[in-house]
Image (cartoon, grey):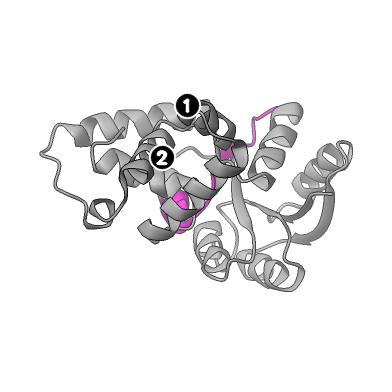
């Protein structure tokens, strides 16, 4: 069973999300009303996923994400009302493996949690468009060699390029004609060599290095 911690400063929002997730057999093992509590619960409960709001009192969702990811306490899926660039890129650079808006439907939300728990990343369509627009703007500048990318093997570069395209582990396996388990191993090794904790961060590096 997938185990989730909900972090949102509105109790009514947490209650609604809990009902949506539990209806799909996903266990909500803890609730936090601020970033500090989210970090503490992630540390204590080691859930599969922390569903994280951005705007919360005290420690915000981005800093809470950074701390949770640094401790490898859980994967973080951001769920917020705001698709502001500062929040999107801040959350991804902090290590979030997904970014959704609260307007996301119940089925899509459950599927996103399941994907993150399975090791994949997710992005809201609105966020994907914003990221692509930002990357297009950055692509006009000369691309400098990325020191971490230079240390990758040819296969790891292939994997990084596919991560840059936003492919899931299953899609990467199909592209490389390998088993899903082998694809997952390639992804893990690539992330390790890049010194990042999420496929979203790897996708940013892939774009910056001109691989995607």
Q: Is residue 98 in the magenta section?
A: yes
- Residue 191 position, x and y percent, is 44, 54
Q: Quadrant of residue 100?
A: top right
Q: Is residue 126 above or below residue 4?
A: above
- Residue 159, by quadrant, is top left
- In the rendered structure, find residue 175 and report the number of the disc placed on it: 1
Q: How many marks?
A: 2
Residue located 78% across and 59% down the image: 31
Residue 147, given in percent of the width and then of the height, sits at: 21, 57
Q: Which residue corresponds to the image point at 42% horizontal and 51% vertical from the top-left?
A: 190
Q: Position of residue 195 (x, y in %)?
A: 39, 61
Q: Is residue 112 left or right of residue 12?
A: left
Inspect the magenta stretch and tell me whether residue 10 lies in it. no
Residue under the image location 64 percent in, 69 percent down = 39
Return the residue nearer the eye: 192 or 64: 192
Left or right relative to 78: residue 94: left
| Disc 2: which residue | 159
Left or right side of 29 for 109: left
Q: Is residue 95 visible?
A: yes
Label 2 vs 1, first from the N-terminus: 2
Residue 124 seen in the figure: no
Task: Specify the segment rendered in magenta.
Answer: 90-105
Q: Residues within 10 Å of mark 1 (few under 14, many from 20)?
A: some
Q: Is residue 38 above or below residue 85?
A: below
Give coordinates of residue 137: x percent, y percent: 22, 32
């Amino acid at each position: 069973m997938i185990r989730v911690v909900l972090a949102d400063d509105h109790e009514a929002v947490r209650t609604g999300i809990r009902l949506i997730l539990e209806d799909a057999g996903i266990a909500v093992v803890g609730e936090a009303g601020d970033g500090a509590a989210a970090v503490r619960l992630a540390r204590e409960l080691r859930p599969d996923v922390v569903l994280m709001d951005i705007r919360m009192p005290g420690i915000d969702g981005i800093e809470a994400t950074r701390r949770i990811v640094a401790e490898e306490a859980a994967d973080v899926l951001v769920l917020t009302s705001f698709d502001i660039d500062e929040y999107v890129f801040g959350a991804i650079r902090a290590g979030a493996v997904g970014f959704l808006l609260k307007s996301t439907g119940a089925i899509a939300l459950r599927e996103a949690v399941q994907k993150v728990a399975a090791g994949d990343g997710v992005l809201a369509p609105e966020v994907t468009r914003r990221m692509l627009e930002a990357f297009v703007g950055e692509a006009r500048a000369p691309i400098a060699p990325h020191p971490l990318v230079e240390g990758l093997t040819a296969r790891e570069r292939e994997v990084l390029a596919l991560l840059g395209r936003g492919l899931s582990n299953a899609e990467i396996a199909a592209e490389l004609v390998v088993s899903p388990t082998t694809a997952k191993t390639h992804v893990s090794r690539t992330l390790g060599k890049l010194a990042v904790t999420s496929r979203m961060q790897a996708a940013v590096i892939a774009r910056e290095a001109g691989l995607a």
